[in-house]
Image (cartoon, rainbow, N blue to C red):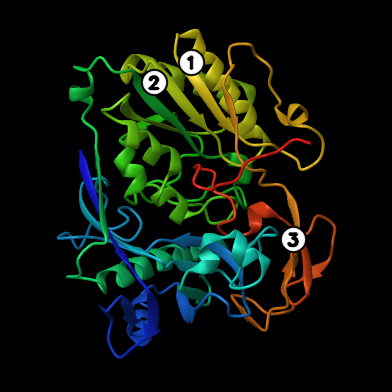
Amino acid sequence: MRLEIESIEIKDVQAGAKTYTKDGVLFINLEELRELILKDSRIKSVDINIVYPGEKIRILNVQDVVQPRCKIGKDDADFPGFINKMQIAGSGRTRSLLGTAVVVSNPSTNRVESGLLDMSGPMAELSPYGKMKNVSIAPYAAEGVGERDFENAVKNAGFLTAVYMARGAEGLPASEVEVFESDLTECAKSDLPRVALYYQTYSPQFDYLAVSDKIVYGNNISFNMPIIVHPNEVLDGGFVGWNALKGIDSYCIQNHGVVKELYKHHGKDLNFVGVVAATANMDADSRERGACMSAHLIKNVLGADAAILQKILGGMPHVDISSTGIECEKLGIKTCVYTTPLTSAGTLGDTILFNDERLDLITISGNQFEKTKIHFQAEKFLGGTAETQLYGQGIKQYAGDSVIDIEQYLLAGVHDLTGNRNIIVNEY
């Protein structure tokens, strides 16, 4: 399977009478985009704003962030299962825009933990999205639409906007072209070490109103058995973010850090043989079943000699990934457990939750639960108002406050559970 991602650098985004790109400037017909979004009967209206770095804007109730992308030569293949018919993602050519993103808000969300993004101030310095020229969309529900059904409509509105923007750059030369190609039959002929990725996509502990978010080809996989997918499917819209922003979003997954790093080494000092996608589990029986099945697929189907195990946010996923690592080691698969601390207090040892001598290579990324005081007085609010209450672990605080005390996993783009941020944990 071969995927080419052709990236175009966008220097500016402006409203225009039509949607096109000239001299690095993406002009967007906002009314045409609005009409496209409102074709979904679940959406009554939508606020659309272009936001720039340095503006004193705070974007609230962020549900997702999406990189503008579209398939080249295939009009019905973008985000399959979500906004287009079901088909396998990960092949052909994809246009991708750099320097801009779609920031998707749900102003009517009832979720307590909700993401935000500042376009200036200290948070904007921490997040790559705060340095981009972005399109902010905030849909509102039509009468009678259920809460979870509307969340899915908001998600799809983000994907539609991303495709619309990318199509506006049609015909422009690419700034860079990345080629992602892996053939399992060819890998079998090589003597290079075979490496797989265990990609933990979701945890049922985060099911909202006891309903899972649609994250894989328009479906959820909360209680499914682990599955084998080609890494290109992860990069090309088959997998997306949750309906909540917690240290990961669709933009992160479109640029999955571990997938891209393994591809850099593919065919040189290792062969990247595939991805086992799974969820964390809520009970011991399911955890044991999932761990055994994942290890079996990695060893006996993909034929891997080694595996990187990547977790999602939370404590249940922490235990789940250790169980999977132990089962892999039992089968002779060398593992690297790529994990995160679970608290901003105490030591790294206090948060590891597992201790097995077989798991002797553990990589610690940034601490998503680190509490940060953001000193910033916003003058304009999108996706909410100055009176929108923000999550603060017992602290009553509002979007209009000049100082907010918040855990970093709720700050859009500050962390990336796929491994794309330059953040480490130092223990003093």
Tell me whether circle 1 and circle 2 mark residues in contact (CB < 8 Å).
Answer: yes
Q: Quadrant of residue 258?
A: top left
Q: Residue at x 67, y 39 (%)?
A: 425
- Give the SS element for disc 1: helix
> In the rendered view of the protein, which quadrant contains the C terminus?
top right
| Amino acid tagged 1 | Cys
Q: Residues within 10 Å of mark 2 (few under 14, many from 20)?
A: many
Residue corresponding to mark 1: 328
Residue corresponding to mark 2: 298
Compare marks 1 and 2 and give the one earlier in the sequence.
2
Q: Position of residue 16 (x, y in %)?
A: 33, 88
State left or right for residue 425 relative to residue 225: right
Q: Say the numbered circle drawn on residue 391.
A: 3
User: In the picture shown, does residue 417 fall above or below 77?
Assistant: above
Q: Furthest residue to the left? A: 73
| Amino acid tagged 3 | Tyr
Q: CA distance from mark 1 to mark 2?
A: 8 Å
